[in-house]
Image (spheres, grey):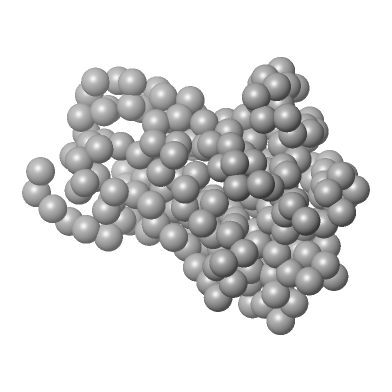
């Protein structure tokens, strides 16, 4: 029987790569996102079902999880790739900025855990992957809001992993460095920003969607049944190394 998955943020740069890898491995995927048009384009390529979901709304996320079970008869893996990137110092961050950063990142992650984990618990186990950031591990200027929220996701990852471990539900996170996706384009498309960002990554290049999707796919694999509560850094050395470039 094919494995069944749900991906929130499926039409994004990383999400579409995750979906392609899951389908290539024989899985079925309910591809979720906030806009119908890009989901439909991806569905044409991959032949998988889609759902328009605003993951800030926990009821919509729960409905998507229920639909995935209806479609596939099971839910083996779920990924939250909803998110945002706010680059402002604390004194320029408005309350609206702060709340939106929480909603886009932490609220969506919590909503997926609370909807998917109980289904997996009664279904014999499964894997949930959330999205952190290298900025949660190393202090970067102008990252106060996003760093705080991503650190919260790592705390959520560990606590949920502990709660559901006895049922075989694994919860992990991936923490990328700067990755070349539409969400971060205003950073890496600017020559000065690109030069600064490259210097921060010891391996000398920015990440690609495939770099991050590969890690997510690996964590979702049924072969990784002994990994939970872990944040996997995929950041070119950003958060772990200090080198002169």
Query: Residue at (39%, 31%) from the top-left corner?
Result: 180
Question: 203 or 191: which is nearer to us?
Answer: 203
Question: 230 or 45: which is nearer to us?
Answer: 45
Q: In which quarter of the image is residue 164?
A: bottom right
Residue 222: x and y in percent read 62, 64
- Horizontally, residue 184 falls left or right of residue 104, namely left
Number of labelled discs?
0
Residue 74: x and y in percent read 82, 57
Q: Quadrant of residue 187?
A: top left
Query: Residue at (73%, 30%) from the top-left corner?
Result: 47
- Horizontally, residue 63 falls left or right of residue 151, namely right
Q: Farthest residue in the bottom direction?
A: 166
Q: Where the N terminus falls, by quadrant?
A: bottom right
Q: Farthest residue in the right direction?
A: 70
Tell me, yes or no, if residue 133 can be seen here: no
Residue 54: x and y in percent read 75, 35
Question: 139 or 134: which is nearer to us?
Answer: 134
Q: In this view, does 61 lie above or below 87?
A: below
Q: Where the C terminus falls, by quadrant?
A: top left
Tell me, yes or no, if residue 192 can be seen here: yes
- Horizontally, residue 70 falls left or right of residue 76, namely right
Query: Residue at (24%, 20%) from the top-left corner?
Result: 191
Residue 214: x and y in percent read 47, 48
Query: Residue at (74%, 52%) from the top-left corner?
Result: 2
Q: Quadrant of residue 42?
A: top right
Q: Farthest residue in the left direction?
A: 244
């Amino acid at each position: 029987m094919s494995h069944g998955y749900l991906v929130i943020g499926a039409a994004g740069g990383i999400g579409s790569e995750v979906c392609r890898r899951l389908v290539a491995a024989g899985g079925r995927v309910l591809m979720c996102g906030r806009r119908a048009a890009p989901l439909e384009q991806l569905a044409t390529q991959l032949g998988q079902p889609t759902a328009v979901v605003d993951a800030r709304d926990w009821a919509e996320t729960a409905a998507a999880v229920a639909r995935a079970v209806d479609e596939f008869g099971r839910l083996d893996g779920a990924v939250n790739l909803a998110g945002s990137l706010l680059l402002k110092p604390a004194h320029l961050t408005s309350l609206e900025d702060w709340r939106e950063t929480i909603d886009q990142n932490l609220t969506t992650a919590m909503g997926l855990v609370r909807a998917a984990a109980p289904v997996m618990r009664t279904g014999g186990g499964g894997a949930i992957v959330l999205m952190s950031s290298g900025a949660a591990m190393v202090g970067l200027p102008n990252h106060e809001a996003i760093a705080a929220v991503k650190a919260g996701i790592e705390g959520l990852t560990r606590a949920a992993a502990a709660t559901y471990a006895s049922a075989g539900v694994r919860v992990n996170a991936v923490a990328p460095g700067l990755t070349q996706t539409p969400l971060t384009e205003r950073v890496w498309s600017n020559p000065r920003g690109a030069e600064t960002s490259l210097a921060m990554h010891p391996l000398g290049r920015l990440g690609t969607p495939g770099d991050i999707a590969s890690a997510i796919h690996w964590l979702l694999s049924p072969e990784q049944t002994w990994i939970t509560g872990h944040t996997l850094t995929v950041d070119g050395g950003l958060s772990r190394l200090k080198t002169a470039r």
